[in-house]
Image (tube, rainbow, N blue to C red):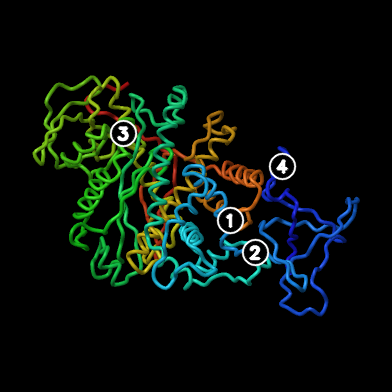
Amino acid sequence: MSFYPVSSRPVIAGVEIPGGVVGQAVVVAVPVSALVWPVRAGSGGDGRSALLVAGASPMTAGEPVVWCTVVVTAPAVVRRDGRVQAAGRPCDHARLGVAEQELDRRCGPGTIDRIAAAVRPTGKIKAVARREMSVAFTIRAVLLMTVMPDADSREVLTTLLGELTAVPWQRAHTVPSGTVLSSWRAAIGEPPLQQLQRELLAAVVAEHRDDAEHRDDAEHRDGTARVEVGGGLRLGAIDGTVTRMPDTKANRAAFGTAGQAETGYPQIRHLHVSDAFTRATLGVVAGPAGGDQAGRDEGGRDKGEAEQQLLDRMLAEQPGVFGPDRLWVMDRNFPGVPRIAAMLATGSHVLIRVKSDIRLPRIGPFAEDGSYLTRLSGGGTTVTMRVVEYHVSIDGAITPELFCLVTDLLDHHTHPAHQLAQAYRWRWDGSETALREAKSAIHDAGPGTGAILRSHTPELIRQEHAAWIVGTELVRATTRSAAATAQPFRKGPRTGQPVAARHLSFSTARRTLITTVRAGTATASLPAPARAAAHQHALAVVATARVTTDRHRHRDHKIKSRQAFPHAPRGIASRTVPAVMHVCGSTAA
């Protein structure tokens, strides 16, 4: 028996909630005396009916009241025995809460339903009968699955449906099984999720481009909008990663492995292009783990080649990601003169660290900032680049490694060497930290053993991978929206400064999005003001979950994963140590 009264008042279809009300959901107060059981005695049936509100009078103080949360608005079905049930099915009303609101803000209202309408399921599922599942519901379930790493399929579906299963529907509905979800995933294939990925990332690129055009110059100088590299450029980061998957013959044949071919798990490799400051994903391309021959990546020899091929694909398939407003920071795996020339042809700029075995002949005098010009040749192409070399000292000791960067930004007055050297460290924030955050949303990520993605066929791996990119980017979109409404820092070294997305906890944002689905704010029929209030409440929660950044932490020993055996005490303590850069050839300030 459900305690959610069906109301015919237009308040549920759309009412102006007073501005002072910021609750998470629509709550209805009904006197206990007004609730009646509509089923006639002795009529039999299964008893599935909602209580009705009959003859409610003005409430008096102290009167017992039932407080009900609105779950869904649906047409009533009245049975001959008096039972009142809801027409339709729960999967048509399930939504992804705040995550879907963030998606619709960027890609237009009803994005998932629009994409689902063009999908024709294959195989045994024709999506003609009134089933427990639908194409749109399957898309939402796969998206939710990728941000719930410890949940099995049944828990994901239970979370997505929420209280919708408690409603007495015209036909009894239950939570679908994991087998049903797998069948529907196979029936819709990978195109819907890949289309969703393309639309969302294109919207994110446009969002950052518009953001750069409308921000005030003072914000840029303050460092809240971008990292200062001169010339009004925004800093981007490019890096690759591999993700493990179940070891099936199909997965191994399609993707290979980037480690030991006999013992390593199959892996999908993807190239991640992001905004270095917000960590927002701007572009992604994926492919096999290694190069032309899977499993050749021993000692990293094939890793660079595989990621270079992905970068070539991105330049050909997603040219809109690159533009004259960007300076791309890349590590040592990407240099290649034709590739650099192809990136420069898009109007973008590059800042690349080069390996120690690459010769950089100086073709002119040293500039005032210690940089100099060189020519890079290869593949029948020659480009003129500027070289910035510097050392980093920690605790007064200079590290033995020399950092060498090349860039096409030749004007040392507009783009001083010290700014470019400081910009390179943002590769870790824009790539390494962004990828680490994203992998926190999938199962068993990290240097340990075991599969991460769940799917057992290459097509479903590509579907799940696209859903993971979309899911994690919606989490970051939520942090950007929360940062836009957050109050400035009130204490600490950033007192008075505005909050940026990178200052907010990715994990808290992810858990908050899941909570909005589980709490019932995922229903399609809630009033627009109620959905807006729930959205603002969720953003307020995310805005308060702030993390410490730029701590300059240093340890003389690093262990990536916990070992099975105990270690002898080393007396190691983390400490705050600022790093100081010394540009070669320049005088100390």
Q: Quadrant of residue 467?
A: bottom left
Which of discs 2 and 1 lies nearer the camera? The answer is 2
User: Of label 1 and label 3, which has the lower sequence position?
Assistant: 3
Say which amino acid is labelled 1: Val
Residue 86, placed above or below residue 308: below
Query: Is the residue 338 above or below the residue 213 in the image?
Result: below
Residue at the image point whose x is 18% and y is 36% from the top: 341
Residue at the image position 45 percent from the left and 51 percent from the top: 472
Task: Depth check: give the residue in front, 69 or 454.
Answer: 69
Query: Which residue was labeled with disc 1?
Result: 517
Query: Is disc 4 in contact with disc 3, using a CB cutoff of under 8 Å?
Result: no
Q: Which residue is mark 2?
A: 87
Q: State the SS at label 4.
A: loop
- Residue pointed to by mark 3: 323
Check disc 2 and give the amino acid type.
Answer: Ala
Residue 507, given in percent of the width and then of the height, sits at: 51, 51
The amino acid type, in three-letter code, at marker 3 is: Gly
User: Secondary structure beneath disc 3?
Assistant: loop
Percent across and percent down for residue 172 are: 63, 72
Judging by the rendered image, the residue that carries numbered circle 4 is 17
User: Cα distance, mark 2 to mark 3?
Assistant: 51 Å
Name the kind of residue labelled 4 in the image: Ile
Q: Is residue 60 visible?
A: yes
Question: Quick one: label 3, few (<14), some, or many (20+) residues within 10 Å?
Answer: some
As drawn, the residue found furthest toward the left would be 380
